[in-house]
């Protein structure tokens, strides 16, 4: 787990319960966490902080959805890994996430082991 300790991860999530869950899980694996409540906030944070190592992007959010936010962030930081996370895990969602610029995809409810594996994959 050493290769992911102290990494800075931006959690983009509008649901408070999910946000707390991600923060707790990421703190357990010794990652540093920033939080954005919507896509617009995520873009702003990514513009101002080039230390972010990875983004966990909720897809369904108010103001700007995760797909649009991902496209905008990739314009600023094309190599920043973005993992889409959504509760609406329908057939084709993974492909749609990848087509919209996300580097990977995880369905909610998120399992800790699966998330750690994905984070490791993109930060190793």
Image: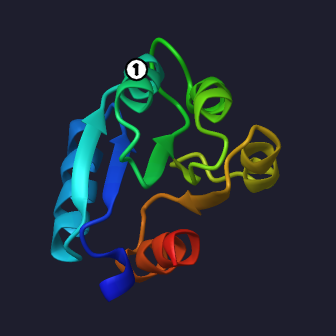
Q: Is residue 21 above or below residue 1?
A: above
Q: Residue at x 46, y 48 (%)?
A: 55
Q: Position of residue 18 (x, y in %)?
A: 29, 48
Residue located 71% across and 51% down the image: 90
Residue 18 to residue 74: above or below: below
Tell me if 124 is positioned left or right of 14 in this view.
right
User: Could one spot residue 13 in this view of the protein?
Assistant: yes
Residue 24's spot in the image, x, y percent? 17, 62
Q: Quadrant of residue 72?
A: top right
Which of these two is toward me, 93 or 99? 99
Q: Residue at x 37, y 21 (%)?
A: 41
On screen, 54 above or below 45? below
Q: Which residue is mark 1?
A: 44
Quadrant where the N terminus is found in the figure: bottom left
Q: Which residue is pictured at 40% across the width and 20% down the height? A: 44
Colour mode of the rendering: rainbow
Of residues 16 and 5, the one nearer the viewer is 5
Secondary structure category for the residue under label 1: helix
Dividing the picture into quarters, in which one does residue 17 lie?
Answer: top left
Tell whether 15 sits left or right of 58: left
Name the residue nearer the viewer: 121 or 22: 121
Q: Rate crowding at label 1 as few (under 14), some (14 to 19) or many (20 or more) other CA atoms within 10 Å.
A: few
- Count the labels in the image: 1
Q: Is residue 90 left or right of 15 when viewed as pictured?
A: right
Quarter where residue 10 is shown? top left
* Front in this rendered view, residue 66 or 120: 120
Q: In x, y percent, where is residue 121?
A: 57, 77
Residue 112 x, y percent position in the rendering: 36, 76
């Amino acid at each position: 787990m050493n290769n992911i300790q102290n990494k800075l991860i931006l959690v983009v999530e509008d649901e408070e319960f999910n946000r707390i869950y991600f923060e707790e899980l990421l703190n357990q694996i010794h990652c540093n966490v920033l939080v954005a409540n919507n896509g617009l906030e995520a873009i702003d944070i990514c513009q101002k902080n080039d230390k972010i190592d990875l983004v966990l992007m909720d897809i369904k959010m108010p103001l700007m959805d995760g797909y649009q936010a991902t496209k905008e962030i990739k314009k600023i930081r094309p190599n920043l890994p973005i993992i889409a996370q959504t509760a609406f895990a329908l057939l084709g969602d993974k492909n749609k996430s990848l087509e919209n610029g996300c580097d990977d995809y995880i369905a909610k409810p998120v399992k800790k082991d699966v998330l750690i594996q994905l984070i490791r994959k993109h930060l190793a």
